[in-house]
Amino acid sequence: MFPDPKASLRRQMSGLLREMRDEAPTLSARIVRAIGSSPFWRAGKTVMAYLAMPGEVDLDALWSLEDRPRLCVPVPDWDSRSMTPVVIEDLARDLRRMREGRHPSMPGGLREPAHGLESVVPSELDVILVPALAFDPRGRRLGRSGGFYDRFLGGLGPQTLTVGVCFGGQLVQDVPVEPHDVAVRMLVTEHGVRSI
């Protein structure tokens, strides 16, 4: 039986992110600054960010930027493996803790949007900031194996700019892909923003 190249790369990247825990806040702040000074941020009216899991680039500081666009985050539907963007105006007010049973390895559970927030039709999104365990120079991404983002990105039109967000160490030479995998069109790390 042949080893699964995606599983192997996931293990490698998960280990890297654990090793980077101490420097992650500083690098996340640099990435937020790079996003905030980018043309796509200034031009976008509605941007979908995400609520970082441990090890991911933390984008919370985007909500503190002046003249920010309308910011959304995805709400996952675990049964259908789909996502719906909802508007988050205030992180303290509009978020709650997910029940721990969904992610028992996360003490206190993960954050998720509260019920009753305004939803956004995907066609309204100008920019989507996409997390991943790894990206390659062609914008191909290695997710966490749930398929949420591939399904969501696969249904978007060309008017929506997809931007991969990661630490520089998460850039690899080649991400193994399958037919359903969807690449991003731009990447941002602590070193800045670059088009694919």
Image (cartoon, rainbow, N blue to C red):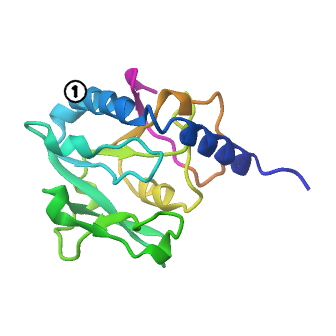
Q: Does the magenta run of residues contain 65? A: no
User: Residue 61 sits in which quadrant?
Assistant: top left
Q: Is residue 90 visible?
A: yes
Image point (57%, 37%), residue name: 19
Q: In the image shown, does 87 or 96 lie closer to the viewer?
A: 96
**Residue 164, image x and y in percent?**
43, 38
Image point (40%, 76%), residue name: 99
Q: Check the image and report above or below for 142 versus 32.
A: below
Q: Does the magenta run of residues contain 194? A: yes
**Residue 155, image x and y in percent?**
41, 58
**64 with respect to 32 (left or right):** left
Residue linked to disc 1: 39
Q: Which residues are magenta?
A: 182-196
**67 with respect to 127 (left or right):** left
- Secondary structure beneath dot 1 equals helix
Image point (30%, 49%), residue name: 49
Seen from this angle, which residue lies furthest left?
A: 67
**Residue 129, image x and y in percent?**
35, 44
Q: Amino acid at mark 1?
A: Pro
Q: Check the image and report above or below for 162 versus 93.
A: above
Seen from this angle, which residue lies furthest top?
A: 191
**75 with respect to 21 (left or right):** left
**Residue 180, image x and y in percent?**
59, 55
Q: In the image shown, does 158 or 186 lie closer to the viewer?
A: 186
User: Residue 63 sits in which quadrant?
Assistant: top left
Q: In the image shown, does 32 or 149 lie closer to the viewer?
A: 32
Q: Check the image and report above or below for 74 versus 79.
A: above
